[in-house]
Amino acid sequence: MAGETTGVEIVDAALAGEAAPYAERLVADQVASKLASQDATLWGPEAESEASIRLSWTTLHKSSRPLIGEIEALRTDLRSEGVDRVVLAGMGGSSLAPEVITATDGVPLTVLDTTDPGQVADALAGDLERTVIVVSSKSGGTVETDSHRRIFAKAFADAGIDAARRIVVVTDPGSPFAELSEKEGYRKVFLADPNVGGRYSALTAFGLVPAGLAGADVARLLDQAASVADELAADSVDNPAVKLAAAWGAAHEKKGAEKLVIATVPSKEGGSVLKGFADWAEQLIAESTGKQGTGLLPVAVEGPDSPGFADAKGDATPVAVGQAEGAAKISVTGSLGAQFLLWEFATALAGRLLGINPFDQPDVEAAKKAARSLLDNPDKLKGGEEPSTVDGAVEVFGSDGVVTDGKLADILRAFFDSAPETGYIAVQAYLDRLDDASTAVLRGEIAKRTGRQTTFGWGPRFLHSTGQYHKGGHQNGVFLQITGAVEDDLDVPDRPYTLGVLQHAQALGDGQVLAEHGRPVLRLHLTDRAAGLAELVRAVQEAGE
């Protein structure tokens, strides 16, 4: 509810004491009030030009109000036409915020932030007569989102449905996508605030339009954010954002705890459960802070009893979203809208403490370029693809220096052991997030058996999230890629590649960039997804014995 108490409690007494000077420094420098007034000088002269066009998110609880009526009017019109199924095509901030908003509100939204042909085919198999697709992209050039738009436009046309009437666009004013949408006559174009970066866009049209069309109460969300705005702008050690940023900064600098393990904890009073919030926070923090060889690595876990949280070591700080439970050193409480704004403020303040620009993402483009290069040279996708080892339904590939010979369990054991004791293991699954959902069990299994912090990301969506940290943050990660055979591929209309080829290029491209950074990459290709996954889980368990 809008009046739900919002606050930050530093549960660990030692951390609270170490955080106090950091909080006092932020207060003395009036960082919170300057941030609220959109002072672009807070992160130094090198960041000023970028920050000057990225701070409108601080007032979205006011400036996004006119969207409420527009969204409701379109939703009413669509419902009157029997269109009540909403599909969202968007990546990164364009998908993560709407997903947590609708999941928390308990309303259905089909999210496409994937290039897996099976997952996209499942979305296409829904009732197209009842479907509207929201295509969200700041420029329209995002390859995944552009592919979804093309595929759905053709599917509508093939079904005898006027595609333009079923496509709603969210983009920036004056973008190439805005121009294309005007030309194609799409049903509605919502122009978002251009002075907000993707990961800070939860309360812009990118977050509100798809969620609102799906039936979420977006007016309440803005009310929740507004209820804490003044408190977050206050230069006070009691400001929740100041407390949270100070704790992060102190843990990072004083303890070497560069990881934040985030678990959502249900309220004992029966308050709202912020479903998927850790995934949204993961992008915000990783992409904002992971650069110049430093940063905070968020580790989204299943709950407070999960490996990595319950048994966190000195390199990690367990953070409960909700009331403190188990090993939590920090708890953050409040409604969803309030927490969106709180975590955004805290992340920007943490950027000040870390000495980085929290609004750029200098390493994200590298993987995109590598994937585009492979798509432009299809022979590269086919060449050099002989596996070093085949173990059942699993083919093994590795970057230079990675052990790839022997039994799969032995290969995994050697790979996990190559991660520094205070490093991390990143599992990157280029699979179907729905049909292959059980792949996510690998995170906990690996963390439990190795004692190392372990992240899990669905490819390619993590490329728009933790992908920045992987290249720009602390260089102590090892990367386990999982790819899978494609049974039924999907053509991308008017493009020289299929979704399966694009997905493969994205995995190989990112692996190539990581290897160029000197990071170990082990790729396991499942020639049969179900059988290969079962074999992989068994091998992980054996590797930990």
Image (cartoon, grey):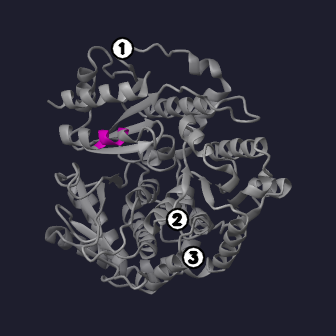
| Disc on the earlier residue, 2 or 3 | 3
Q: Please state which amino acid type lies under the numbered disc 3.
A: Leu
Q: Nearer the viewer, residue 187 or 503?
A: 187
Q: Which residue is mark 3?
A: 60
Percent from the top left, x then y, of residue 500?
A: 58, 30
* Residue assigned mark 2: 200
In this rendering, position of residue 20 left or right of residue 360: left
| Residue 327 location (% of width, % of height) | 17, 61
Residue 532 located left or right of residue 516: left
Disc 2 crowd, CA 10 A, few/some/many (<14, 14-19, 20+): many
- Horizontal side of residue 357 vs 138, given as left or right: left
Q: Nearer the viewer, mark 2 or mark 1?
A: 1
> Which range is magenta?
439-443
Query: Which one is earlier in the sequence, the residue at label 2 or at label 1?
Result: 2
Residue at 35% in and 80% down: 6
Hey, what amino acid is under mark 2? Tyr
- The quadrant of the picture occupied by the N terminus is bottom left
Q: Which residue is mark 1?
A: 389
Label 3 sits on a secondary structure element that is helix
Confirm whether the magenta stretch covers residue 441. Answer: yes
Which residue, as the protein is rendered here, is positioned at the far right? Answer: 183
**Mark 2 → mark 1, Cα distance in angstroms:** 43 Å
Placement of the C terminus among the 4 image quadrants:
top left
- Residue at horizontal 78 percent and vertical 44 percent from the top: 157
